[in-house]
Amino acid sequence: MIIDSLLDTDFYKLTMQQCVFHNFTDVKVEYTFKCRNLPSRIFLPYKDEIEKEIDDLCKLRFYDAELAYLKKFPFFKEGYLEFLRIFNLNRSFVKVFEKEGKFNIKIAGTWLNTILFETPILAIVCQLYSRDNGNISEGQKRLAEKAYALQSYDKPFQFVDFGTRRRYSVEWQEYVISFLKNSLPQNFIGTSNVMFAKQHHIKPIGTMAHEYIQAMQSLVRLSDSQKHAFQKWAEEYRGKLGIALSDTLGMDAFLKDFDLYFAKLFDGARHDSGDPFIWCNKLIKHYEDIGIDPRTKTAVFSDSLNPVIAMKINDAFFDKIQCSYGIGTNLTNDVGFTVPNIVIKMTRCDGRPVAKISDSLGKQMCDDKEYLKYLASVFNIPKERLE
């Protein structure tokens, strides 16, 4: 059994679920699986095992000790935690299937009851595929080299493990976290994995994901969707968890909505696609243009990072804006083979299409081309970004 705790998930999944619990209980959604860099048929030999692991996942409940841990965070409300006490994942909401020689996963149900599927299912798929590839001794060597490079770095630098979804294995992620905690106590400040944060007494970190902003596209007037997402988040967390995700519709569309009001409400923004140097210069200029000192704000970088890239970004911006780094697959699955770049993204909400149009080609996700064109017209997104 790969997943044996519902806390073995990303922290932002729980924070988003609470926001959904208080605001969007009856909303129905659909999610779709995609592998960006390899043909999906590579997962077909593991289909039966994946199904069995999902069966086991849906038998899990939150334990009292896990709920007691979450209760330590003042932004988790009692009503939501009591909901978690009776919560379980419903197996009927997930379909794993083969179609025309391709591997597929579809998730459909109420948003409240499906939101916790993504991270553990991706971790299951990745671990079953990874076990037949890679080399742990090679991974240990590479991890030690990364730690040495960071130990030798002479500027302020803090980073977080963001690697649960595409980890080599649950055991390897725990090894990585323990190693980093001991080797880089001044640099390694936490993990997005709630279970390991609890076990290793480190900070769980995360705020919102693309699906949260995507869903708003079908729930309010499209032109107001990002602003509605930010407003509801600010009302839910009252100044806590204040990092806004910037690339669901691209940085330019984000900045048009991220006006003085939201720029003051939120502590900063997260980069997850496109050129990080262009992105951060735009963010800094935006703060300066609206009269905010960018040095009082935070830029979180999380797109396909490794320590070398992160240090280059840090060299450019550490004295201009507060910087933090979320490093995922390069920490938890760098063991000597090509890691499948797998995602599960929301594609429909309340029966209507929703989309993610990032600042990187190949990261777009939508199952309705006409809607994608309409969305691009509303937010003045260039046609080439729709490829």
Image (spheres, helix red, strand yellow):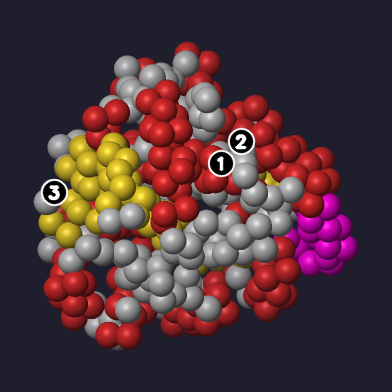
Residue highlighted by disc 2: 170
| Secondary element type, mark 3 | loop
Residue type, label 3: Asp
| Secondary element type, mark 1 | helix
| Chain-order first, disc 3 or disc 1 | 1
Residue 265, located in which quarter of the rendered image?
bottom left
Q: Residue at x 47, y 53 (%)?
A: 42
Residue type, label 2: Val
Q: CA distance from mark 3 to mark 2?
A: 34 Å
Q: Residue at x 32, y 79 (%)?
A: 387
x and y percentages locating residue 134 in the rendered image = 69, 50
Residue highlighted by disc 3: 350
Instruction: Reply above or below: 228 against 31.
Output: below
Q: Depth check: 134 or 19 in front? A: 134
Instruction: Determine which of the numbered discs, if any, sits on residue 127 in the image.
Output: 1
Say if residue 16 shows up in the picture. Answer: yes
| Chain-order first, disc 2 or disc 1 | 1
Residue segment shown in magenta: 140-158
Q: CA distance from mark 3 to mark 1?
A: 32 Å
Residue type, label 1: Gln
Q: CA distance from mark 2 to mark 1?
A: 8 Å
Say if residue 300 shows up in the picture. Answer: no
